[in-house]
Image: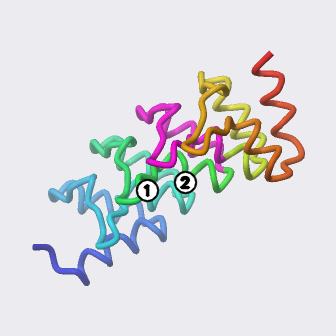
Amino acid sequence: MPDPAAMEQVFELVREGETEALRALLAAGLAANLQNARGDGLLMIAAYNGRHAVAQLLLEHGADPGLPNPKGQLPIVGAAYQGDARMVALLLDGGAPVDGAGPDGRTALMTAALFDRAPVVELLLARGADPALRDAKGQTALEAARAMGARVTPGLLAGAMG
Protein backbone atom coordinates (compact mmCIF):
# COMPACT_ATOMS: atom_id res chain seq x y z
CA MET A 1 0.00 0.00 0.00
CA PRO A 2 1.52 3.36 -1.02
CA ASP A 3 2.40 5.87 1.67
CA PRO A 4 -0.52 8.37 1.76
CA ALA A 5 1.77 11.35 2.37
CA ALA A 6 4.05 10.41 -0.53
CA MET A 7 1.04 9.85 -2.75
CA GLU A 8 -0.36 13.28 -1.85
CA GLN A 9 3.00 14.81 -2.79
CA VAL A 10 2.70 13.25 -6.25
CA PHE A 11 -0.75 14.77 -6.68
CA GLU A 12 0.58 18.12 -5.48
CA LEU A 13 3.24 17.96 -8.22
CA VAL A 14 0.44 17.52 -10.75
CA ARG A 15 -1.63 20.39 -9.29
CA GLU A 16 1.43 22.66 -9.37
CA GLY A 17 2.42 21.66 -12.91
CA GLU A 18 5.80 20.21 -11.93
CA THR A 19 6.31 18.39 -15.21
CA GLU A 20 9.99 17.52 -14.85
CA ALA A 21 9.63 16.10 -11.34
CA LEU A 22 6.69 14.03 -12.53
CA ARG A 23 8.65 12.90 -15.60
CA ALA A 24 11.36 11.52 -13.29
CA LEU A 25 8.79 9.67 -11.18
CA LEU A 26 7.13 8.19 -14.26
CA ALA A 27 10.54 7.08 -15.56
CA ALA A 28 11.12 5.40 -12.18
CA GLY A 29 7.88 3.42 -12.53
CA LEU A 30 5.11 5.63 -11.16
CA ALA A 31 1.78 4.44 -12.56
CA ALA A 32 0.28 7.03 -14.92
CA ASN A 33 -3.21 5.98 -13.77
CA LEU A 34 -2.47 6.40 -10.05
CA GLN A 35 -5.56 7.47 -8.11
CA ASN A 36 -5.67 9.37 -4.82
CA ALA A 37 -7.72 8.44 -1.75
CA ARG A 38 -10.80 10.09 -3.30
CA GLY A 39 -10.34 8.09 -6.49
CA ASP A 40 -9.26 10.97 -8.72
CA GLY A 41 -6.54 10.01 -11.17
CA LEU A 42 -3.47 12.06 -11.98
CA LEU A 43 -4.95 12.95 -15.36
CA MET A 44 -8.20 14.14 -13.76
CA ILE A 45 -6.23 16.47 -11.48
CA ALA A 46 -4.13 17.76 -14.39
CA ALA A 47 -7.23 18.33 -16.53
CA TYR A 48 -9.17 20.13 -13.81
CA ASN A 49 -6.20 22.36 -12.97
CA GLY A 50 -5.31 23.25 -16.55
CA ARG A 51 -1.90 21.58 -16.45
CA HIS A 52 -1.50 20.94 -20.18
CA ALA A 53 2.14 19.81 -20.16
CA VAL A 54 1.48 17.44 -17.27
CA ALA A 55 -1.58 16.01 -19.01
CA GLN A 56 0.42 15.48 -22.21
CA LEU A 57 3.18 13.75 -20.24
CA LEU A 58 0.69 11.48 -18.48
CA LEU A 59 -0.96 10.57 -21.78
CA GLU A 60 2.45 9.78 -23.27
CA HIS A 61 3.01 7.42 -20.33
CA GLY A 62 -0.26 5.58 -20.86
CA ALA A 63 -2.74 7.47 -18.68
CA ASP A 64 -6.28 6.48 -19.61
CA PRO A 65 -8.32 9.57 -20.60
CA GLY A 66 -11.49 7.52 -20.14
CA LEU A 67 -10.73 6.60 -16.51
CA PRO A 68 -13.54 7.94 -14.31
CA ASN A 69 -13.35 8.75 -10.63
CA PRO A 70 -15.73 6.94 -8.24
CA LYS A 71 -18.45 9.50 -9.03
CA GLY A 72 -18.15 8.55 -12.70
CA GLN A 73 -16.64 11.90 -13.68
CA LEU A 74 -14.22 11.94 -16.60
CA PRO A 75 -11.19 14.22 -17.13
CA ILE A 76 -12.71 15.67 -20.32
CA VAL A 77 -15.85 16.70 -18.44
CA GLY A 78 -13.70 18.45 -15.81
CA ALA A 79 -11.84 20.31 -18.55
CA ALA A 80 -15.14 21.25 -20.21
CA TYR A 81 -16.48 22.57 -16.90
CA GLN A 82 -13.37 24.73 -16.58
CA GLY A 83 -13.86 26.03 -20.13
CA ASP A 84 -10.40 24.79 -21.13
CA ALA A 85 -10.70 24.09 -24.86
CA ARG A 86 -6.98 23.41 -25.15
CA MET A 87 -7.19 20.68 -22.50
CA VAL A 88 -10.32 19.22 -24.08
CA ALA A 89 -8.48 19.00 -27.42
CA LEU A 90 -5.45 17.42 -25.76
CA LEU A 91 -7.63 14.79 -24.08
CA LEU A 92 -9.50 14.07 -27.32
CA ASP A 93 -6.19 13.70 -29.14
CA GLY A 94 -5.14 11.31 -26.36
CA GLY A 95 -8.17 9.09 -26.91
CA ALA A 96 -10.84 10.52 -24.61
CA PRO A 97 -14.32 9.52 -25.78
CA VAL A 98 -15.98 12.63 -27.22
CA ASP A 99 -19.37 11.55 -25.87
CA GLY A 100 -18.13 9.84 -22.71
CA ALA A 101 -20.47 10.31 -19.74
CA GLY A 102 -20.77 9.34 -16.12
CA PRO A 103 -23.76 7.78 -14.36
CA ASP A 104 -25.65 11.08 -14.70
CA GLY A 105 -25.33 10.78 -18.47
CA ARG A 106 -23.76 14.22 -18.71
CA THR A 107 -21.17 14.53 -21.47
CA ALA A 108 -18.47 17.16 -21.89
CA LEU A 109 -20.72 18.87 -24.46
CA MET A 110 -23.58 19.07 -21.98
CA THR A 111 -21.30 20.42 -19.26
CA ALA A 112 -19.76 23.03 -21.54
CA ALA A 113 -23.21 24.06 -22.77
CA LEU A 114 -24.60 24.39 -19.24
CA PHE A 115 -21.82 26.74 -18.20
CA ASP A 116 -21.82 28.67 -21.50
CA ARG A 117 -18.30 27.60 -22.48
CA ALA A 118 -18.74 28.45 -26.17
CA PRO A 119 -15.19 27.65 -27.37
CA VAL A 120 -15.44 24.19 -25.80
CA VAL A 121 -18.88 23.59 -27.32
CA GLU A 122 -17.56 24.60 -30.76
CA LEU A 123 -14.56 22.30 -30.40
CA LEU A 124 -16.62 19.33 -29.23
CA LEU A 125 -19.14 19.76 -32.03
CA ALA A 126 -16.30 19.99 -34.56
CA ARG A 127 -14.85 16.76 -33.12
CA GLY A 128 -18.13 14.89 -33.51
CA ALA A 129 -19.93 15.28 -30.18
CA ASP A 130 -23.58 14.32 -30.52
CA PRO A 131 -25.86 17.23 -29.51
CA ALA A 132 -28.91 14.94 -29.54
CA LEU A 133 -27.74 12.76 -26.63
CA ARG A 134 -29.78 12.98 -23.44
CA ASP A 135 -28.56 12.84 -19.85
CA ALA A 136 -30.15 10.75 -17.08
CA LYS A 137 -32.79 13.48 -16.61
CA GLY A 138 -33.71 13.25 -20.29
CA GLN A 139 -32.22 16.62 -21.27
CA THR A 140 -30.12 17.37 -24.32
CA ALA A 141 -27.23 19.81 -24.10
CA LEU A 142 -29.46 22.47 -25.70
CA GLU A 143 -32.28 21.95 -23.21
CA ALA A 144 -29.90 22.01 -20.26
CA ALA A 145 -28.17 25.16 -21.52
CA ARG A 146 -31.48 26.95 -21.96
CA ALA A 147 -32.64 25.85 -18.49
CA MET A 148 -29.43 27.29 -16.98
CA GLY A 149 -29.84 30.57 -18.84
CA ALA A 150 -26.71 30.19 -20.94
CA ARG A 151 -26.40 33.04 -23.43
CA VAL A 152 -24.22 31.79 -26.28
CA THR A 153 -24.20 28.00 -26.30
CA PRO A 154 -27.91 27.49 -27.03
CA GLY A 155 -27.45 29.17 -30.40
CA LEU A 156 -24.44 27.01 -31.22
CA LEU A 157 -26.31 23.85 -30.31
CA ALA A 158 -29.50 24.84 -32.14
CA GLY A 159 -27.43 25.42 -35.26
CA ALA A 160 -25.72 22.04 -34.87
CA MET A 161 -29.02 20.23 -34.50
CA GLY A 162 -30.30 21.81 -37.71
Q: Residue at x 30, y 69 (%)?
A: 36
Residue toward you, 2 or 39: 39
* Direction from residue 91 to residue 132 in the image, left or right: right
- x, y (%) of residue 128? 59, 21
Rendered-image quadrant of the C terminus:
top right
- x, y (%) of residue 2? 14, 74
Instruction: Inspect the image, locate mark 1, and give the three-letter code of the amino acid beneath it.
Output: Met
User: Is residue 31 in the magenta section?
Assistant: no
Crowd class of label 2 (few under 14; some 14 to 19; many from 20; radius 10 Å): many
- Which span is picked out in magenta? 84-111
Q: Could you tell me if the residues under marks 2 and 1 are in contact, i.e. CB atoms within 8 Å?
A: yes
Q: Residue at x 83, y 37 (%)?
A: 154
Q: For the view shown, which residue lies furthest in the bottom direction?
A: 5
* Direction from residue 2 to residue 82 in the image, left or right: right
Instruction: Inspect the image, locate mark 2, and give the three-letter code of the amino acid beneath it.
Output: Gly
CA distance for labels 2 and 1 = 7 Å
- x, y (%) of residue 24? 26, 60
> What residue is disc 2 on?
78
Q: Earlier in the sequence, mark 2 or mark 1?
A: 1
Residue toward you, 145 or 41: 145
Residue 82 falls in which quadrant of the image? bottom right
Q: Residue at x 64, y 47 (%)?
A: 111
Q: For the view shown, which residue lies furthest in the top direction?
A: 162
Rendered-image quadrant of the N terminus:
bottom left
> What residue is disc 1 on?
44
Crowd class of label 1 (few under 14; some 14 to 19; many from 20; radius 10 Å): many
| 91 vs 131: above or below | below
Q: How is the image coloured?
A: rainbow
